[in-house]
Amino acid sequence: PERIGFWLDFETAYITCDNNYIESLWWILKQIWDKGLLYQDYKVVPYCPRCGTSLSSHEVAQGYKTIKENSIYVKLKVKNQKDTYLLVWTTTPWTLPGNVAVAVNPSFVYTKVKNGSDYLILAKERLTILKKEYRVVEKFKGKDLEGLEYQSLYNFEKPDKKAHYVVTADFVSLEEGTGIVHMAPAFGEDDMKVGKENNLPVLMTVNEEGKFKNKIKNWAGMFVKDADPLIIEDLKKRKLLYKEEM
């Protein structure tokens, strides 16, 4: 059998806990600051509430598991249109208190259908998810929905910018859901990107321990995943839960 190996340069090696290395990093940071190139912003990263630190993509991949979770279809009441709702789909009910917009694909065809006593708006290609018989009332391109306003699901925090309206995004697909995507910039990389493009507010509803902040009065102090069934039940009581599925 052949032997393999590699060389290590212990004389000039750098160690991240070494003071010289740390001093060098601070020096570099100071140069960036002096040139006016340092700014504060939000970035969505994998995060461990137990450790209280962000994680690398490699760390997340090591513990990756395929799991089954409930998904829900939620009705968002369109302003100034009687009994009319945008139908959105999500697998993360705990992010709904942080919702600030919904996204549609500008090139997709969307429909307004009469379904029971409600009028629902969703992508034409996703009509198969509807529970009852429906009647198509109107068809339009996604770009025609841009700017349409809807009522906020929750009012725990007043946004500091315009919120709760339809924006357009090319990443919206027809593979699952309704073709209308709920946007919570604090909790999704695509959401944050779209949020910055549209100057949307960022609602930070969760603390460093992965629990809802005190301002989220209904579930304050509760770990977000434990709150999922309670949020679903709340939506059901308010007649805003269209359906739930595994």
Image: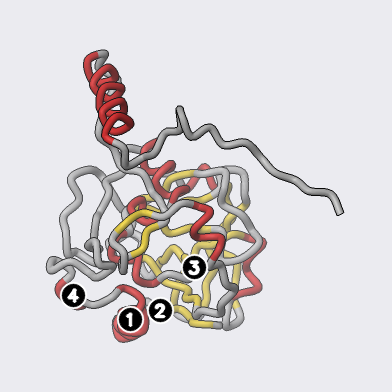
Q: How far apart are the alpha carbons under marks 4 and 1?
A: 11 Å
- At label 2, counting other C-alpha atoms closer than 10 Å, the crowd grade (few under 14, some 14-19, many 20 or more) is some
Q: How far apart are the alpha carbons under marks 2 and 1?
A: 18 Å
Judging depth in this view, the residue of 168 and 211 nearest the camera is 211
Q: Is residue 12 left or right of residue 203?
A: right
Quadrant of the rendered structure where residue 124 is?
Answer: bottom right
Q: Which residue matches tag 2?
A: 241
Quadrant of the rendered structure where residue 67 is?
Answer: bottom right
Residue 80 in view (yes/no): no
Could you tell me which secondary element the residue under label 1 belongs to?
Answer: helix
Judging depth in this view, the residue of 185 and 233 nearest the camera is 185
Q: Amino acid under label 3?
A: Trp
The circle drawn on residue 221 is: 4
Q: Which residue matches tag 1?
A: 226
Could you tell me which secondary element the residue under label 2 belongs to?
Answer: strand
Q: Amino acid under label 2?
A: Leu
